[in-house]
Image (cartoon, rainbow, N blue to C red):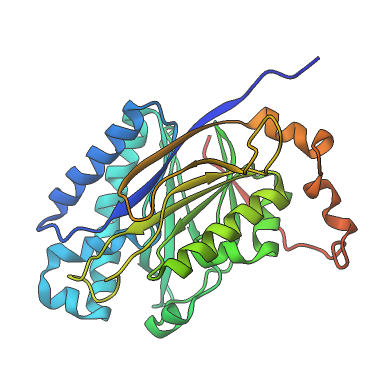
Amino acid sequence: MTAPSRTVRIAASAYPLDALPTLGAIEDKIMRWVAEAAGDGAELLVFPEYGAMELAAPAGAAVVASLDASLQAVSEAFPHIDAVHADLAERYNVHILGASGPRLDADGRYRNTARFFAPSGKSGAQDKRVMTPFEHGWGIAPGDSTLVFDTALGRIGVAICYDSEFPMLVRAMVEARAEIILVPTCTEFVSGFHRVRTSAMARALEGTCVAVVSPTVGDSTWSPAVDYNNGAAGIYVPAERGLSETGILAEGALNVAGWVHAKVDLAALARLADTGEMRNRADWRLQPGGAAEVPAATVVSLL
C-alpha cells in the first residue's frame, strides 16, 4: 500500500535590495512580499543571504558608505525586523526564513545569521559555517553549530550560500533527517550563482532531499557591500522518473525579481531512499571514506 502524500508548497525569492528611507518602508516591503507568496498558497518562504543589508539604508549615506557602520546598523535593526517576520509567520500561518545578515555576537564579532520563523511563534537561527574570502575581509566569524529545525512541515536545514558547497556539512543535516535544505545566497558574479546552483542540486541528489536556492538579484550600487548581485531562484530534487526528469522542480530567470513556487511531495521523496532508480542517500557509506563519522547536527523544535 502506497503511503499518502505529504506535500509542502515552497516559495523561493529572487530578492532585489532597495535603498529605502526608513525601517517602516522596509517593513512594508517585506509585508508585501510575504502577502504575495502566502496568497499564492506558499507554506515555506525563503529570503536570501545578505538581503538584510538593506536595513543599513535608513541610517543614511554616511553609514552605508562605511562597512563597519553598515554591519552595526543591520545588527541593531534585527530585533525590529525579526518581530515583523514573527508576526507575519503567525498571521499567514507560514514558515519564513528571513534574509540573513551580520549579527553582533556576545564575543564582539559579527556572524552571518539567517533567522527562521514558525507560525507557532517559535524561531531559530543558523550561522554560516564557512566564510568566503570577502567575508574574511569583512571580519565575519564562522558559526560553530549545525542545526536542523523540526517544524510542522518536516525537518529543515539551512546551508547559507558557500556552506552548500561542502557535502559533509549538509550531510550532517541529512543524517539528522532534514528533508528540505534552504540555501539563501548572495553572489556577485554569474559564475558564483552557478557554483551555488550546482552545489544545491548535488546536495539534493546526495541527500534525497529538496534544496531551495534564494538569491539577491540586480544592482544595488547604493551599497558598496552588496553592490552587484546575480542569481535565479530555484527548487531542486534528485532527478528521478515520477518526481522530476531534470531535478528542477521550478526555476526563475536570471536576475528577474519575484517568487518561484513549487509543490513537493515529501512522502514520495522519502520513498526514493529505498526504491529509487539510484539510492544515493542509502549508499553514502559505500563510497571510499563514506563510513567516516559525520559531525552531528542539533535538532531544534519550532513546533
Quick check: 296 left or right of 130? Answer: right
**Is residue 141 placed above or below 122 in the rendered structure?**
below
Quick check: 158 left or right of 78? Answer: right
Residue 49, percent across and down?
40, 60
**Is residue 206 placed above or below 268 in the rendered structure?**
below
Identify the residue shown where x is 13% and y is 49%: 25
Quick check: 54 left or right of 50? Answer: left
Residue 128, percent across and down?
50, 65
Residue 63, percent across and down?
16, 75
The answer to whether one can see residue 97 in this image is no
Which residue reaches farthest top? 1
Which residue reaches farthest bottom? 137
* Closer to the camera in the image, 7 or 140: 7
**Is residue 203 placed above or below 151 in the rendered structure?**
below
Residue 210, percent across and down?
60, 43
- What quarter of the picture does the N terminus occupy? top right
Identify the residue shown where x is 37% and y is 50%: 98
